[in-house]
Image: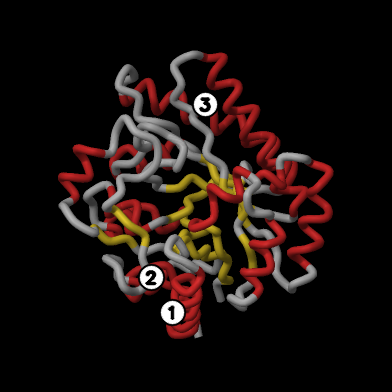
Amino acid sequence: MPQLAAFPKGFIKQLVSGEMSIYEWIELATKLEIDGLEFYNDFADVKDSTNWPKIRKAVEATGMVIPMMCASPDFTIPDPEGRAREVAKEIASIRMSAELGAKYCRVLSGQRRKEITREEGLGYVVASIEACLPIAEELGITLIIENHYKDDFWTEPEFAQMMDVFVELVGRINSPWFGVNFDPSNAIAAGEEPLDLLEAVKHRVVTMHASDRYLANGTIEDLRRQEGGTAGYVSFFKHGVIGKGLNDYDAIFSTLKGVGFNGWISIEDGVDGMEQMHESAEFLKRKITQHWG
């Protein structure tokens, strides 16, 4: 049966700035009664490697583990030295993941820069991920690429946001240490059907971000027009309680169960408070039990 983790989407900026300590988040998360906590490599408390044993111990003392590391490498930088720095940062995140006990570390493609072609971008990204795979294998870490929308700290959307690019990218990398972190809401952000994307990559999915988005106003076309050139997400495309948004979780879980998925599902919610995350956790627990028994 899949295990449930949580990612502190609602507190990410405070955790990155150091305004909120990782220990405060661990304490809040214990009340969710879940199995693990997904970390982000830019949390202030994890930037000092001497903190890693203490942080890991604090999580494991609650009965939880750290299964996944969220990292956001930008592999579409045209300058080779810039890409090499991103590879080095991802390798550092892989090492961090291993020290914290995680088995999965996220990779992304990078920003959709207007000055690069699709083929150039695919070449940059594939070469960069392949440069990270030897250390991932050595440390027992599976790299997971997410069908992503836009990192909180980026100005441009994801290079491989659209399904055709994402599916081609995934198909170009053949390694047991590489898989997909499926996020259904990000497919909606692309103006595409999440179930179509899932069908195309279902045999490569090893982890999942459980989220549910809704348009507070406007349309997907409005989102397209406003998404580039500013940091973070467009304001009217919002995270909501899982099970109350645009995704069909029965269909998603049926598909995953059908291909033998038994990995981690990480809750990406809580933007409007812990009450929402509690509601999302309870919904997902019910659905996991319903579909996996």
* Residue named by callout 3: 127
Q: Is residue 203 above or below residue 136?
A: below
Residue for badge 1: 283
Name the quarter where the N terminus is drawn: bottom right
Alpha-carbon span between mark 2 and mark 3: 37 Å
Q: Secondary structure at mark 2?
A: loop
Q: CA distance from mark 3 to mark 1?
A: 39 Å
Residue drawn at x 36%, y 45% as measured from the top left: 233
Sequence-wise first label, 2 or 3: 3
Q: Residue at x 47, y 56 (%)?
A: 205
> Given the image, on which type of amino acid does mark 3 rest?
Ala
Marks 2,1: beta carbons within 8 A: yes
Circle 1 Cα neighbour tier, 10 Å, few/some/many (<14 / 14–19 / ≥20): some
What residue do we see at 31% from left, 54% from top?
Answer: 197
Query: What colour-coding does the image apply?
Result: secondary structure
Percent x, y of residue 180: 47, 51
| Secondary element at image label 3 | helix
Q: Is residue 228 visible to the viewer in this orientation of the structure?
A: yes
Single out the residue that lies furthest toward the front.
19
Observer-side mark, 2 or 1, equals 2
> Whole-percent x and y of residue 247?
30, 66
Q: Secondary structure at mark 1?
A: helix
Q: Residues within 10 Å of mark 3 (few under 14, many from 20)?
A: some
- Pointer 2 residue: 241
Residue 59: horizontal and vertical position, in percent?
74, 64
Relative horizontal placement of residue 12, taking residue 197 as reference (left or right) = right
Foreground pick, 99 / 252: 99
Q: Earlier in the sequence, mark 3 or mark 1?
A: 3
Residue 250 vertical position relative to residue 207 in the rendered view, above or below = below
Q: Position of residue 209 (x, y in %)?
A: 46, 59
Three-letter code for the amino acid on which mark 1 is drawn: Phe
Question: What's under tag 2, amino acid-wise?
Answer: Val
